[in-house]
């Protein structure tokens, strides 16, 4: 994984994040300490990415 292809987001209360797995790859860093994580997956029907 190259740093220029990496996004690090600093989460805040009430934040919501989503990405298009057809064009990106998600990997957790595991550095969220004792914070509670909720992950829900949604799969949408649609066109192939361009």
Image (cartoon, helix red, strand yellow):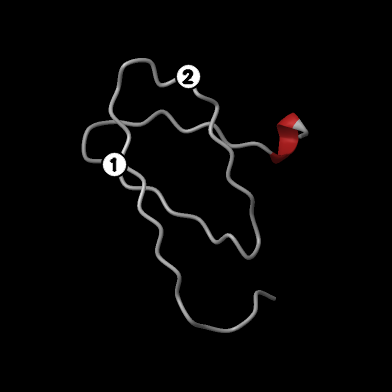
Q: How many numbered circles are shown? A: 2
Residue under numbered circle 1: 15
The image quadrant of residue 20 is bottom right
The image quadrant of residue 48 is bottom right
Furthest-right residue in this view: 2
Residue under numbered circle 2: 31
Indicate which disc residue 30 carries: none
Q: Position of residue 31 (x, y in %)?
A: 47, 19
Give SS at disc 1: loop
- Residue drawn at x 58%, y 84% as measured from the top left: 47
Front position in the image: 49 or 31: 31
Q: Is residue 31 above or below residue 25?
A: above
Q: Position of residue 34 (x, y in %)?
A: 31, 16
- The local crowd at label 1, few if under 14, some if 14 to 19, many if 20 or more residues have their Cα within 10 Å, is few
Quarter placement of the C terminus: bottom right
- Residue drawn at x 64%, y 50% as measured from the top left: 25
Give SS at disc 2: loop
Left/right placement of residue 48 relative to residue 33 reads: right
Q: Which of marks 1 and 2 is in front?
A: 2
Quarter placement of the N terminus: top right
**Looking at the image, is mark 1 or mark 2 earlier in the sequence?**
1
């Amino acid at each position: 994984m190259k740093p220029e292809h990496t996004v690090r987001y600093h989460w805040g209360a009430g934040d919501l994040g989503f990405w298009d797995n057809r064009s990106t790859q998600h990997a957790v860093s595991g550095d969220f300490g004792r914070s509670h994580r909720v992950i829900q997956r949604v799969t949408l029907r649609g066109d192939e990415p361009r």
